[in-house]
Image (cartoon, grey):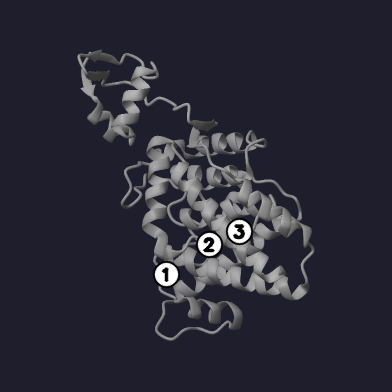
Amino acid sequence: MEYKNIAYFAGKWNIKERRIRILCAEGRIHGAKKIGKTWLIPEDAEKPIDKRFKQVIDLFYEEIDFKVIDNKKKVIDSHRPFSQNINKQLRSKLVVEWTYNSNAIEGNTLTLSETKVVLENGITIKGKPLKDHLESINHKEAIEYIEALVSKNIGLSEYEIKAIHHLILKEVDSANAGKYRNENVLISGAKHLPPSYLNVSLEMQKFIDKYQNMSKTHPLVRACFLHGEFVKIHPFVDGNGRTARLLMNFELIKSGYPPVVIKTEDRAEYYDALDRAHTTNDYTDFIKMIVDLVNESEDLYLYLIG
């Protein structure tokens, strides 16, 4: 059996060397042995689940305090139902900013103000591709669709996911809209390799089963699971990111939290957090990012309700 040093596993597992030494001393890494002052670990050793982490299904994350966002939610809930004017302001801002940022992350060239004009006035922006206009209109319809699911108390299923994806790609790539991919794909800039297209259907069934068994998990963790594990499977040829962000916000809205907007300027941090989750199952960075965004959204609600 070949052994490697701690530095090797620090890079492989994305854990600090000091922490690995502690885990070795605690007997948390199977087969680890100490020679003099040096720890050696079997090359095929599995990454340990650190006791400092919570584990949910296959993912885990560091202890995270949800009290702040939960307390803000209670204050917001105490003011429901909101006035018609507040609802209108919140929804208008949300739809435009969510649509702009989610599409911009994927390469759409419309600016925030241009997206607003397209969505609210139906005007075509001179010099901008028809595809970019369609993506904005489609995304707005997809938001309306998940809002309808929540209002009708309809649970998430493969059928609903395909319906959301169909709305995202209709008239942009109708041949692939709402259909699982029949080819293998790569995620640009990521270490993670999505499963073979032959396994997509099975992986999506397992994905839904796991989600349905998370009813006792904090809603924000469920939302992050939906986003992260969906993108990990990458079931469609295109439109996975936009669909994942819709799924995440579906869960937040369903659970009474405000939806969040991942901004295009935070794209690098967002991709890094997702890739870490996909390659190590450690969702800490991604969950912390979404907690911050929920806080930001709740502050906007609190500002409006006074």
The amino acid on which the numbered mark 1 sits, given as a three-letter code, is Asn
Earlier in the chain: of badge 2 and badge 1, it is 1
Marks 1/3: CA–CA distance: 21 Å
- Residue 4, x across and y down, in percent: 22, 22
**In the foreground, 34 or 29:** 34
Which callout, 1 or 3, points to the residue nearer the camera? 3
Residue where numbered disc 3 is placed: 259
Under tag 2, what secondary structure? loop
Q: Are marks 2 and 1 in contact (CB under 8 Å)?
A: no
Looking at the picture, which amino acid does disc 2 mark?
Val
Residue 19 percent location from the top left of the image:
35, 29
Q: Foreground: 257 or 183?
A: 257
Element carrying mark 1: loop
Q: Residues within 10 Å of mark 2 (few under 14, many from 20)?
A: many
Q: Is residue 300 left or right of residue 232?
A: right
Vertical position of residue 240 compared to residue 277: above or below: below
Circle 2 residue: 261
Which residue is located at x 51 percent, y 34 percent?
A: 202
Q: CA distance from mark 2 to mark 1?
A: 16 Å
Q: Which residue is mark 1?
A: 108
